Image: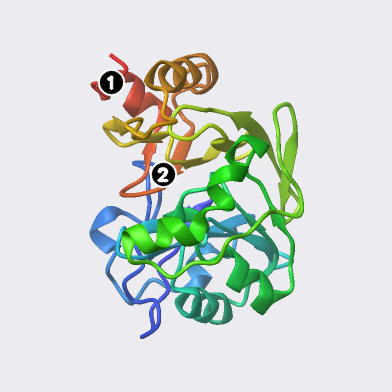
Amino acid sequence: MPRFIYCPGPSIKQHQLATDPTCRLQRDRIASPEIKLADAEKWSLKAAIIPVTPLQQNCSLIWDAATGSGAVVDPGGDVTKILEAIAQLGMKPDKIVLTHGHIDHAGGAAELKQQLGVPIEGPHLADKFLLEGLEAQGREYGIAARNVLPDLWLTEPGTLNIGGHDFEILHCPGHSPGSLVFVNHAHKFILMGDVLFQGSIGRTDFPYGDHDALITAIKTKLLKLDDAYTFVPGHGPGSSIGMERQSNPFLV
């Protein structure tokens, strides 16, 4: 699994550190400014989380330790904050990745693409209507946004490459029709979007939501993975497949 690092500094000092019980950076050290990038030098896949927008969505920076190449996943807003984090970390994003088309995950994608000059990949084509309506979503939630379409729609079966690391693409509709989950089997690590959370699941009370489809996707695609797989959800703390299999009230 990748190791999540806390990056001290005024621009991103509020980083949330998503960990699992096996992570060497224990939860009681999350807020410690003594945690340095050097602590993670031996890990081949690095990640950092930047909570963005009033909805505190987990924008993730994922990159290869050796090359610095990586991606920005779900830049929902606060683009200046994201750019400051990229500069501080020294990572080199070569793409923007979207798990689905909601405002808090995709609202800053157009601006960030313009700033970085990199392509957008994902989500699934079924979320096109949401991406074309980001400005309307923004007015509803009070979040500035621009409509955007990706350079590449993603689908299952398929593979997403981030910094030389392959992630299996899983289409998990229900929260939105085009919601995607990205699974790196080498590190047993998942970028979950809003499909599954610690102790909960994605909302399905939208007009296009589908609770049964979401539960089916989780049970047939995610719970088939072994307990050691850890994940970063779209909001809140990280978890593992094992933890959710045992205790998530929507699944037990």
Q: Seen in the image, is 242 located left or right of residue 148?
A: left
The amino acid sitting under disc 1 is Phe
Is residue 227 visible in this depiction of the protein? Answer: yes
Q: Which mark is residue 191?
A: none
**Residue at the spot 30% in from the left edge and 36% down from the top edge:** 198
Q: Who is closer to the viewer here, 95 or 130?
A: 130
- Name the foreground residue: 155 vs 164: 155
Residue displayed at 32% across by 48% down: 237
**Identity, as a three-letter code, of the amino acid under mark 2:** Pro
- Marks 2 and 1: in contact by CB < 8 Å? no
Mark 2 Cα shell of 10 Å, populated few (<14), some (14-19), many (≥20) = many
Q: Name the residue rendered at 66%, 46% in the picture.
A: 122
Report x, y in % for residue 42. 60, 59
Cα distance between the residues tagged 1 and 2: 16 Å
Query: Whole-percent x and y of residue 147?
Result: 58, 61
Give the SS element for disc 1: loop
Q: Residue 65: x, y in percent?
A: 65, 63
The tag on residue 250 is 1
Residue shown at 38% from the left, 71% from the top: 35
Instruction: Report helix, strand or loop for mark 2.
Output: strand
User: Which part of the image, by quadrant, shows the N terminus?
Assistant: top right
Q: Can you tell which quarter of the image residue 180 is in?
A: top right
| Quadrant where the image shows the C terminus | top left
Residue 64: % across, % down? 67, 59
Q: Is residue 150 above or below residue 79?
A: above
Residue that sits furthest to the bottom in the current view: 10
Write down the quadrant of residue 62 in the picture: bottom right
Question: 8 or 205: which is nearer to us?
Answer: 205
User: What is the number of the mark on residue 233?
Assistant: 2
**Apparent side of residue 15 relative to residue 48 in the rendered image (left or right):** left
The residue nearer to you, when weighing 28 against 70, is 70
Q: Is residue 64 visible?
A: no
